[in-house]
Amino acid sequence: MMENTEPKPIEELSFREAMAELDGIVGVLESNSLELEDSLRSYERGVSLLRALQGRLTEAQQKVDVLMGELVADVDDGARDTSLS
């Protein structure tokens, strides 16, 4: 009966949970133990998980880039202020 339960929506999964689920899907698909329909369903879920994870990583990288840019700007401003005194 567990097979009929819907998986948790991807947006509700933590990054770690999504990675673990994707890893499990890859393992099952590599085992060739599923029927075609189940394989397709698992593959579709895996693609959705992968896209969501890539999106989260891109978002995190953009935040890091912004923070690093602010850090560099602060250092440059401090250097300019010092050289003007």
Image (cartoon, rainbow, N blue to C red):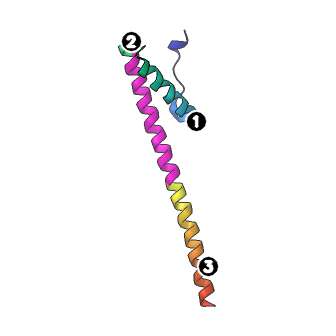
Can see residue 14? no
Q: Residue 16 got which mark?
A: 1
Q: Position of residue 52 (x, y in %)?
A: 47, 38
Q: Residue 78 got which mark?
A: 3
Q: Residue 44 got which mark?
A: none
The amino acid marked with disc number 3 is Gly
Tell me the distance, in whole angstroms, between the alpha carbons under discs 2 and 3: 64 Å
In the rendered image, the residue lying farthest to the top is 1
Q: Which residue is mark 2?
A: 35
Q: Residues within 10 Å of mark 2 (few under 14, many from 20)?
A: few
The amino acid marked with disc number 1 is Arg
The amino acid marked with disc number 2 is Glu
Q: Which residues, given as a range, are shown in magenta? A: 38-61
Q: Position of residue 9 (x, y in %)?
A: 52, 29
Secondary structure at numbered mark 3: helix
Q: Quadrant of residue 14?
A: top right
- Magenta-span inclusion, residue 40: yes
| Quadrant (top left/top right/bottom left/bottom right) for the N terminus | top right
Which residue sits at x=49%, y=29%?
22
In the rendered image, the residue lying farthest to the bottom is 85
Q: Residues within 10 Å of mark 1 (few under 14, many from 20)?
A: few
Which residue sits at x=40%, y=26%?
44
